[in-house]
Amino acid sequence: MTDELSAALAALRDADLVVPVPPVEPLTWATVSVSGQTWLPAFSSAALVSEPSRPIAFRQLAAFWPDPGWGLAVDPGLPSQLLLEAGTVARLAREPIGGGLLQMVVTFDQVTAYLGGEALDISGFAHAVDDASLPGSPGPLLEALGLPASDDVYLLRWFSVGPALYRIPYGWTDEAGAAAMSGWVVEPPPFRGTGFVAGPALVIREYKVDGLMPPHGSEIFHLPVDGPERRIAVFDADHRRWLMVRRS
């Protein structure tokens, strides 16, 4: 990879792009054909677009990527043209985990199993807390995760330890799409396979964990529909058990 290409990719990661959008409902994506392949066109400046368009952050575009068989054509037909496959778009939008705070939505039955000592390991999809701030209602988070609205939401939170334990779930909803994304996970909708979950209000980095022992100090929170959240348990790794937290 040349220094020029590396610089262009680094700039693209944090860029706002302009995407042509046909003036019809429901929303559809414009596409172009380059070298016999379908590409979603995006431009580095509104001045380069003569048709109806809308601005979108590169990260958001990657999160909502519409079709694993499409690539991204940045400034198509211009000297600055850059062509990226769908899997490359997803990976470029992501950053290393870097030891952040993660959380997972868990059911009441799972909480009961943890507190009763019937379950210990953490398995499933986890999400970066920094991307999912919840000033009030849990509604935006549940919508982004594709979960039904609920009066009672439980969140298991922990600080990530060992980046190798947290794989980014690239893939799609079928085998062909997962292969096009150079991914390894096949899950039904609303799984996106882009390394993100996303809704109208949130774009959240997603990870896949399997059989993870909760790090010491992990916490379980209860978030009622009208807030605020309340910590109800903390994990004691020395004794390998969850301890209830008294209501203050």
Image: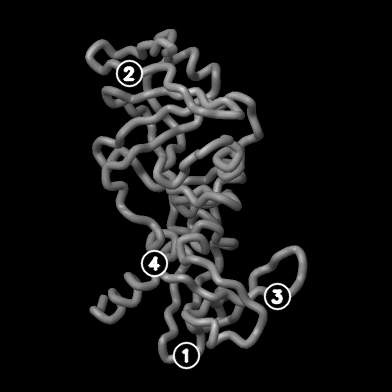
Amino acid type, mark 3: Pro
Q: Which residue is mark 4?
A: 14
Give the residue drawn at x 46%, y 61%: 59
Q: Taking 219 as reference, is 92 above or below it?
A: below
Tell me, yes or no, whether the two marked residues, 3 and 1, touch with CB atoms within 8 Å: no
Q: Which residue is mark 2?
A: 235
Q: CA distance from mark 3 to mark 4?
A: 25 Å
Residue 204 placement (x, y as % from top left): 47, 48
Q: CA distance from mark 4 to mark 1?
A: 21 Å
Q: Which mark is residue 78?
A: 1
**Badge 4 element:** loop
Q: Which residue is mark 3?
A: 22
Q: CA distance from mark 3 to mark 1?
A: 21 Å
Tell me, yes or no, whether the two marked residues, 4 and 2, touch with CB atoms within 8 Å: no
Q: Which mark is residue 112?
A: none
**Badge 3 element:** loop
Residue 137 placement (x, y as % from top left): 58, 35
Number of numbered tags placed on the structure image: 4
Of callouts 2 and 3, the N-terminal one: 3
Of callouts 3 and 4, the N-terminal one: 4
Of callouts 2 and 1, the N-terminal one: 1
Badge nearest the viewer, 2 or 1: 2
Of callouts 4 and 1, the N-terminal one: 4
At label 2, counting other C-alpha atoms closer than 10 Å, the crowd grade (few under 14, some 14-19, many 20 or more) is many
